[in-house]
Image (tube, grey):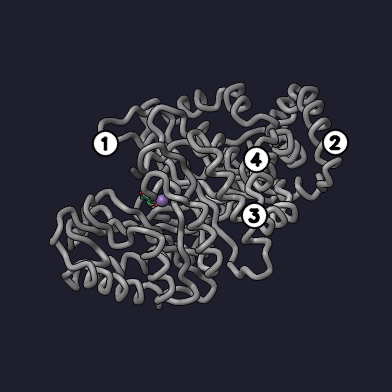
């Protein structure tokens, strides 16, 4: 489904008077405070968040799946859905594929389709956490860490195949999330599992093109409940340091134990020049994969505070980051949820841009905790939504993405085209 530009213009015109009032008020306050509003708008417009191909359908939970209808049935339709999002918000200009859920058949056609929506291919993801029908060895007891070399070899070969698909599409990174772990004390030797995984990852790393990265994701539990080989940021960093320059850590917000100080982890990774990217989502209990910013928007803002501090400090030398969403939907329309998630990420980013860094540094030097809090919360409590809307207006996107999606009855149209019982491949 393609959106006619005129419909976006009509929508924006309708909402323009109220937007202009808000934008005028905010930009005059920000200018008085010494901010360069034009420069902020440029940064907001440039900030793009990749959409995971597996979040376009309702993922459900292990207790059920309530399909909303009109889900994309093929890789082509997944690209069309991300193209739809990008047309609406001009902020979702990339798609992240998961192999073998999204094996491209005709690279040229897939590349052309993505380009027609101005989409790039973000990191490609390997999957050794499920067995495929045609596969010889089972991953029941692990993949890259398995005790049996044949299983490890199969998992290595799969990762290399994923790199090949990515190269054909123009991706520049492989994301490895390893579910390998144990469920019972004594089940495996921790050190040997680590060593076998490192040996396997070295073989995958050797196949990376020069301009590629491998992003190493960590997760403390699930699907295994006693130990995970890459359980935490320390383990991820260890693998990255041992593998080399092209290996970087990936922070999935849902992959931390409750109350973990994720912003400090971000700062540590950046300090070592080893932060590769993000999987954004939100959670209350575990890897809940909820809409970004729906539960802990302050934490998200504090993470962006560290990101901007690190990315703007001359002493921090970290490569460019991959920004991705990793979410699952059960009751919300996936496309509406993704529009809300991208908005939440950009709100946190924009608020963090407003932090008076010089004043904050002074407060920190003077051990003035009260003033430090005043400074960061002043930025956090600024309603920056008119800046995001203005950036969208200037990019010919929808002033209000979710209401545009509803006004245009996009889900109804997708159901009409694809059917009420169309299921996305993936989770
Ligand atoms: C695992 O929970 C994860 O966060 C990894 O990124 C996977 O690739 C993704 O979710 C989909 O299962
Ligand atoms: Mn993830």
Residue 200 image point, x, y percent? 30, 73
How far, Cα to Cα, is label 2 from label 3?
32 Å
- The residue at 30%/76% (across/down) is 199
Name the secondary structure under disc 1: loop
Task: Identify residue for label 4.
Answer: 377
Q: Quarter holding the N terminus? A: top right
Residue 14 image point, x, y percent? 75, 21
Please, is residue 336 above or below residue 372 in the view? above
How far, Cα to Cα, is label 3 from label 4?
17 Å
The reply to whether discs 2 and 1 touch (Cβ–Cβ < 8 Å) is no
Q: Quadrant of residue 228?
A: bottom left
The reply to whether discs 3 and 1 touch (Cβ–Cβ < 8 Å) is no
How far, Cα to Cα, is label 1 from label 4?
39 Å
Q: Closer to the N terminus: mark 3 or mark 4?
A: 3
Task: Identify residue for label 2.
Answer: 28
User: Which label belongs to residue 62?
Assistant: 1
Task: Identify residue for label 3.
Answer: 367
Report whether 184 appears left or right of 406. left
Q: Closer to the N terminus: mark 3 or mark 1?
A: 1
Q: Closer to the N terminus: mark 1 or mark 4?
A: 1
Please, is residue 376 above or below residue 174 in the view? above
How far, Cα to Cα, is label 2 from label 1?
50 Å
């Amino acid at each position: 489904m393609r959106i006619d530009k005129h419909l976006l213009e009509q929508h924006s015109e309708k909402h323009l008077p109220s937007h202009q009032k808000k934008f005028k008020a905010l930009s005059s306050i920000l200018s008085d405070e010494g901010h360069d509003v034009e420069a902020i708008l440029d940064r907001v417009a440039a900030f793009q968040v990749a959409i995971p191909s597996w979040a376009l359908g309702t993922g459900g939970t292990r207790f059920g799946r309530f399909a909303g209808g009109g889900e994309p049935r093929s890789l082509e339709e997944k690209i069309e859905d991300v193209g739809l999002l990008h047309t609406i918000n001009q902020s979702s200009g990339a798609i992240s594929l998961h192999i073998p859920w999204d094996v491209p058949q005709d690279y040229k056609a897939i590349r052309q389709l993505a380009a027609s929506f101005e989409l790039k291919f973000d990191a490609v993801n390997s999957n050794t956490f499920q067995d495929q029908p045609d596969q010889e060895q089972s991953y029941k007891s692990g993949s890259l860490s398995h005790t049996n070399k044949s299983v490890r070899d199969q998992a290595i070969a799969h990762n290399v195949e994923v790199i090949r698909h990515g190269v054909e599409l123009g991706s520049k990174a492989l994301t490895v999330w390893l579910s390998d772990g144990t469920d019972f004390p004594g089940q495996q030797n921790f050190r040997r599992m680590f060593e076998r995984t490192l040996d396997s990852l070295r073989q995958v790393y050797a196949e990376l093109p020069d301009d590629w990265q491998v992003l190493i994701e960590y997760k403390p539990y699930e699907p295994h409940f006693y130990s995970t080989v890459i359980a935490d940021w320390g383990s991820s960093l260890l693998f990255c340091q041992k593998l080399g320059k092209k290996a970087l850590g990936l922070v999935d917000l849902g992959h931390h134990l409750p109350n973990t100080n994720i912003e400090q982890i971000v700062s540590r990774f950046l300090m070592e020049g080893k932060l590769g990217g993000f999987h954004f989502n939100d959670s209350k209990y575990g890897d809940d994969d909820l809409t970004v910013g729906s539960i802990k928007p302050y934490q998200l803002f504090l993470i962006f505070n560290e990101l901007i501090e690190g990315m703007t400090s001359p002493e921090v030398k970290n490569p460019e980051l991959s920004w991705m969403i990793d979410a699952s939907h059960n009751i919300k329309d996936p496309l509406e949820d993704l529009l809300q998630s991208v908005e939440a990420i950009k709100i946190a980013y924009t608020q963090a841009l407003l932090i008076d860094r010089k004043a904050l540094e002074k407060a920190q030097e003077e051990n003035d905790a009260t003033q430090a809090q005043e400074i960061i919360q002043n930025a956090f409590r600024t309603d920056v939504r008119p800046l995001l809307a203005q950036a969208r207006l200037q990019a010919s996107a929808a002033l209000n993405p979710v209401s545009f999606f509803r006004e245009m009855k996009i889900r109804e149209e997708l159901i009409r085209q694809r059917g009420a019982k169309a299921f996305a491949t993936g989770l």
